[in-house]
């Protein structure tokens, strides 16, 4: 039984690390995103192996279901500059490799070789592992303030993402209200009908991309 | 008959540290900003793996480990949304997503 768990652990770990290496080295950025999804799945399987089933479900829902789709949408919106012919790494990528390898050494030597973790040999099974019920209770009791702050953070991120991504379409530094934008479009439509030429800042701004609604 | 008896804790730490360093290498070496974000997501996953491992091996009766992992997942979702919105805004104004071509602040 222990051998089986060991084999599963090694398989999942090897797949996670291999998928991570593919994410950072593969040329096509869409393939990198798909390898990232594979890595998320195997990390979720590792959570299941460690009996953290709620975290595993949340991992699949949030990372695989939401973040990966967001990344794929961003890649598709910026599509034609992400081809295979474009150089994907910096010229001095080996400096980054040295930094990462040195950090790995600095992390691993003190934690693995020079420190004795006091893992309880016979863990107390009477109380049981903390389950989803206890997580929910904890969110409503001792972690109530961080929980509410996290909800505010999500709201701020939602509004911020909309504001940042919406800025260019309004072609203003400031985000307009709906009434101001209707007024602006009405004026622009009239001026377009009169002059039939785009105004100078917009032509300079976007270059070849069509920006007019 | 569970993972605590079968797999020692340092092995899990090695896997998490390896995943973190792979993500660090990706976020430092990629030119594409979407690739940089992919590396950051790998690093956050490694941190979560560490948290869950410490929870399971050292304090399995406390709920704090899983709660921290959930907060990190929340922050990662917010970071991904704002980061990708910024990438799309940069692409709209400069028609590129490569980090070395967005050098307006360079002296």
Image (cartoon, helix red, strand yellow):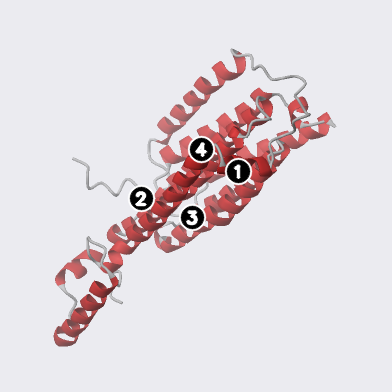
| Same subunit, tags 4 and 2 | yes
Quarter in which the C terminus of chain A is drawn = bottom left
Residue linked to disc 1: A19
Q: Which quadrant holds residue A78?
A: bottom left
Q: Is residue B2 above or below residue A213?
A: above
Using a 10 Å C-alpha cutoff, classify the residue at mark 1 as few (fewer than 14 neighbours), some (14 to 19) or many (20 or more). many
Circle 3 or circle 2, nearest the eye? 3
As rendered, which of A170 and A156 lies closer to the eye? A156
- How far is mark 3 from mark 4, CA to CA? 16 Å
| Same subunit, tags 3 and 1 | yes
Residue linked to disc 2: B98
Mark 4 in CB contact with mark 1 (< 8 angstroms): no
Dot 3: chain letter: A
As rendered, which of A28 and A146 lies closer to the eye? A146
Circle 4 or circle 1, nearest the eye? 4
Q: Which quadrant holds residue B30?
A: top left
Residue linked to disc 3: A71
Q: Is residue B76 above or below residue B95?
A: above
Secondary structure beneath disc 1? helix
Residue at position x 53%, y 58% in the image: A69
Circle 4 or circle 2, nearest the eye? 4
Mark 3 in CB contact with mark 2 (< 8 angstroms): no
Task: Please provide percent x and percent y for residue A31.
Answer: 55, 53
Q: Is residue A125 above or below residue B100?
A: above
Secondary structure beneath disc 2? loop
Quarter in which the N terminus of chain A is drawn = top right
Dot 2: chain letter: B
Mark 3 in CB contact with mark 4 (< 8 angstroms): no
Circle 3 or circle 1, nearest the eye? 3
């Amino acid at each position: 039984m222990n051998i089986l768990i060991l084999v599963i652990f090694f398989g999942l770990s090897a797949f996670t690390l291999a998928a991570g290496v593919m994410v950072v080295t593969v040329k096509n950025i869409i393939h990198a995103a798909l390898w990232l999804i594979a890595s998320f799945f195997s990390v979720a399987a590792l959570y299941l192996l460690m009996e953290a089933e709620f975290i595993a479900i949340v991992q699949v829902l949030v990372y695989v279901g939401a973040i990966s789709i967001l990344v794929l949408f961003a890649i598709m919106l910026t599509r034609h500059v992400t081809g295979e012919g474009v150089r994907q790494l910096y010229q001095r990528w080996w400096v980054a490799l040295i930094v990462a390898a040195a950090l790995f050494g600095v992390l691993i030597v003190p934690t693995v070789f020079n420190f004795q973790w006091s893992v309880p040999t016979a863990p107390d099974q009477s109380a049981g592992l903390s389950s989803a019920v206890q997580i929910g209770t904890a969110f409503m009791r001792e972690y109530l303030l961080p929980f509410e702050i996290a909800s505010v953070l999500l709201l701020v991120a939602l509004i911020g993402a909309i504001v940042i991504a919406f800025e260019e379409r309004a072609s203003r530094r400031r985000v307009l209200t709906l009434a101001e934008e209707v007024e602006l479009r009405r004026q622009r439509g009239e001026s377009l009908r009169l002059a039939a030429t785009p105004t100078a800042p917009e032509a300079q701004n976007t270059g070849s991309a069509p920006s007019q609604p | 008959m569970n993972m605590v008896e079968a797999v020692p804790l340092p092995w899990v730490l090695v896997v998490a540290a390896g995943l973190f360093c792979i993500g660090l290498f990706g976020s430092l070496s990629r030119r594409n900003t979407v690739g940089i974000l992919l590396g950051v997501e790998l690093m956050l996953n490694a941190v979560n793996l560490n948290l869950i491992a410490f929870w399971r091996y050292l304090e399995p009766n406390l709920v704090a480990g899983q709660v921290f992992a959930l907060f990190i997942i929340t922050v990662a979702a917010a970071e991904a949304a704002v980061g990708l919105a910024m990438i799309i805004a940069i692409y709209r104004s400069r028609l590129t997503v490569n980090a070395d071509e967005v050098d307006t602040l360079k002296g």
